[in-house]
Amino acid sequence: MVKLVVVYGHPEDPAAFEKYYAETHLPIAGQIKGVSKVELTKFIGTPDGQKASNYRMAEVYFPTLDELQKQMGSAEGQAAVNDLANFATGGADASVAEVG
């Protein structure tokens, strides 16, 4: 199993980010086929109480690397990728990871 990991930097306006993320981006990303599992994380700080270096993380699991590449290259996958510029004002970094 593999996963696409998207880590978001701190947005300029967290409330606007959260509204857009929940109401617009997640429904767009939800159209991607072949997904085995999704985990969404909002960072709340470091162990010593400091501000976390990142704001959010999305982990989107696929059964194989080929499936991940196929689906992220699809119209639905590209719509999700292209939507990042509409709300990720703190930037977003995407990586592919092997689970296990």
Image (cartoon, rainbow, N blue to C red):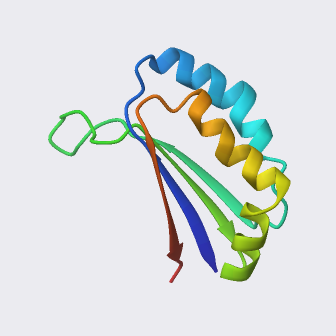
Residue 12 seen by the camera: yes
In the image, residue 2 above or below residue 75: below
Q: Is residue 84 left or right of residue 92?
A: right
Q: Quadrant of residue 71?
A: bottom right
> Residue 65, percent across and down?
66, 80
**Residue 69, image x and y in percent?**
70, 72
Front position in the image: 83 or 28:
83
> Residue 19: x and y, percent?
63, 20
Which image quarter is the N terminus in? Answer: bottom right
Q: Is residue 64 visible?
A: no
Image position of 73 (left or right of 91): right
Left or right position of 92 against 71? left
**Viewer-side residue, 73 vs 64:** 73
Query: Considering only vertical position in the picture, is 75 above or below 9?
Result: below
Residue drawn at the location 40% of the way across and 32% of the way down: 90
Residue name at image x 35 percent, y 35 percent:
44
Q: How many marks?
A: 0
Seen at 28% across and 39% down, the residue is 52
- Residue drawn at x 14%, y 41% is 48
Up/down of 50 relative to 31, above or below: above
